[in-house]
Image (cartoon, rainbow, N blue to C red):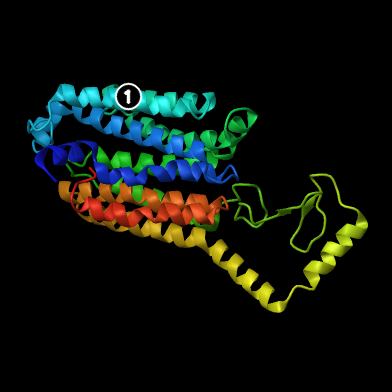
């Protein structure tokens, strides 16, 4: 990597990019639809707006960084401030353009996200409202994935409501990490890392199985596996009719019930094992989440020095990936969850070369 490319990679915090696609994917999961072309547009928009925020952040903090972090690309002179501002503007325009291709509701959500990013970097960062603004931005990013995947029309609005719980969980984590990051250059406070550790533990318990279903199912796991829809009705796990899309005749219902009752034992055993694995996935990913975030936070609680505080912030940023994956698994999208979780190794690899903070 040549010097110019490395400088831009540091400015844009490239390893943190791997934490972005999971926002849209977790949002798509709650729509009960497979990720589609509009989901890809949402991911592209999210990536652009995230990088716009990174460039704008350093442009706004260039005087402060000259004192506290002179090695950063702008104070060190490796990138000119006007170039960083131009990049932030261009990336914001690109993000809004991509969102507009997914529909008006997606553009509105992306517009709110862009406004939150610019407001945070240019005015709110050093105020008490700063962490809340950043948390709102991350929650809006998840909502962008939901509205884009659902597409134009009333489905977009309904998907936003369905995604509220997941967006709230991601926003809570972001709020905690942002509060820690406010002291990463100075250190000296155990309060923020301790609060973040508490939030992380609580979220891991909730996402891993401690809160009611995202889709209102009694088993508390949510997602597509709770009921099976047939052409004429909604079938429960024993093949009976629950209703909802019309109803089947009694003869058809009894026939379907006999088919389920006479399934081969081996098939039933495999199905049971698959369901057990699927239901355990949110808990496993929640453990990965708390494992990624908790250790560096605990170290920062014991010794809130700048290096350990920065390491805690980095761990909190990387922990977003297993959190997003756990949220997707909770919504009943194990494939999307595993795809999101697969981004974690790449994030760790690149973080060894370029800092995420």
Q: Is residue 330 above or below residue 21?
A: below
Q: Secondary structure at mark 1?
A: helix
In the drawing, does residue 199 fall left or right of residue 318?
right
Is 35 left, or right, of 229 in this rendering?
left
Tell me which residue sits at (38%, 23%) in the image: 115
Q: Position of residue 267 (x, y in %)?
A: 67, 73
Give how far across and how far down residue 226 sits, in percent.
67, 56
Mark 1 closeness class: few <14, some 14–19, many ≥20 residues within 10 Å: many
Location of residue 221 (image quadrant):
bottom right
Assign the C terminus to one quadrant of the image.
Answer: top left
Q: Is residue 319 above or below residue 133?
A: below
Please name whichever residue, 53 or 106, is drawn nearer the observer in this view of the structure.
106
Q: Position of residue 265 (x, y in %)?
A: 71, 78
Instruction: Work out whether residue 224 can be spotted.
Output: yes
In the image, residue 51 above or below residue 258: above
Residue that appears at 29% across and 24% down:
90
Left or right position of 305 against 29: left
| Residue 227: quarter of image | bottom right
Total label count? 1
Inspect this view and state whether residue 202 appears: no
**Residue farthest bottom in this picture:** 265
- Taking depth in this image into account, of 101 and 200 the one nearest to the observer is 101
Q: Residue 186, percent across and down?
A: 16, 40
> Residue beneath label 1, please?
118
In front of the other: 165 or 54: 54
| Along the viewing direction, whichever of 339 and 237 lies nearer the viewer | 339
């Amino acid at each position: 990597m040549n010097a110019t490319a490395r400088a831009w990679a540091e400015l844009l915090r490239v390893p943190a990019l791997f934490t972005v696609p999971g926002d849209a994917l977790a949002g798509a999961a709650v729509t009960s639809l497979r990720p589609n072309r509009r989901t890809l547009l949402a991911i592209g928009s999210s990536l652009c707006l995230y990088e716009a925020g990174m460039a704008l952040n350093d442009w706004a903090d260039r005087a402060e960084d000259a004192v506290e972090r002179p090695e950063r690309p702008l104070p060190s002179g490796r990138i000119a401030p006007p170039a960083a501002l131009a990049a932030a503007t261009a990336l914001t325009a690109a993000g809004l353009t991509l969102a507009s291709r997914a529909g008006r509701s997606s553009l509105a959500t992306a517009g709110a996200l862009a406004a939150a990013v610019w407001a945070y970097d240019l005015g709110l960062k050093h105020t008490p409202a700063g962490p809340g603004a950043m948390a709102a931005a991350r929650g809006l990013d998840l909502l962008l994935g939901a509205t884009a995947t659902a597409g134009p029309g009333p489905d977009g609005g309904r998907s936003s409501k369905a995604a509220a719980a997941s967006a709230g969980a991601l926003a809570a984590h972001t709020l905690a990490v942002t509060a820690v990051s406010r002291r990463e250059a100075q250190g000296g406070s155990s309060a923020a890392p301790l609060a973040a550790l508490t939030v992380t533990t609580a979220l891991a318990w909730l996402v891993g199985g401690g809160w009611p279903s995202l889709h209102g199912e009694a088993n508390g796991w949510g997602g597509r596996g709770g009921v099976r829809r047939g052409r004429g009705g909604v079938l429960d796990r024993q093949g009976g009719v629950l209703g909802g899309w019309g109803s089947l005749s009694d003869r058809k219902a009894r026939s379907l019930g006999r088919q389920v009752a006479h399934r081969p034992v081996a098939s039933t055993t495999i199905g049971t094992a698959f369901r057990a694995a699927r239901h355990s996935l949110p808990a496993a990913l929640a453990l990965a989440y708390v494992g990624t975030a908790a250790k560096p936070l605990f170290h920062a609680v014991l010794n809130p020095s700048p290096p350990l505080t920065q390491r805690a912030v980095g761990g909190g940023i990387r922990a977003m990936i297993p959190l997003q994956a756990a949220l997707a698994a909770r919504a009943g999208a194990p494939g999307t969850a595993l795809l999101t979780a697969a981004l974690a190794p790449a994030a760790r690899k690149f973080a060894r070369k370029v800092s995420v903070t």
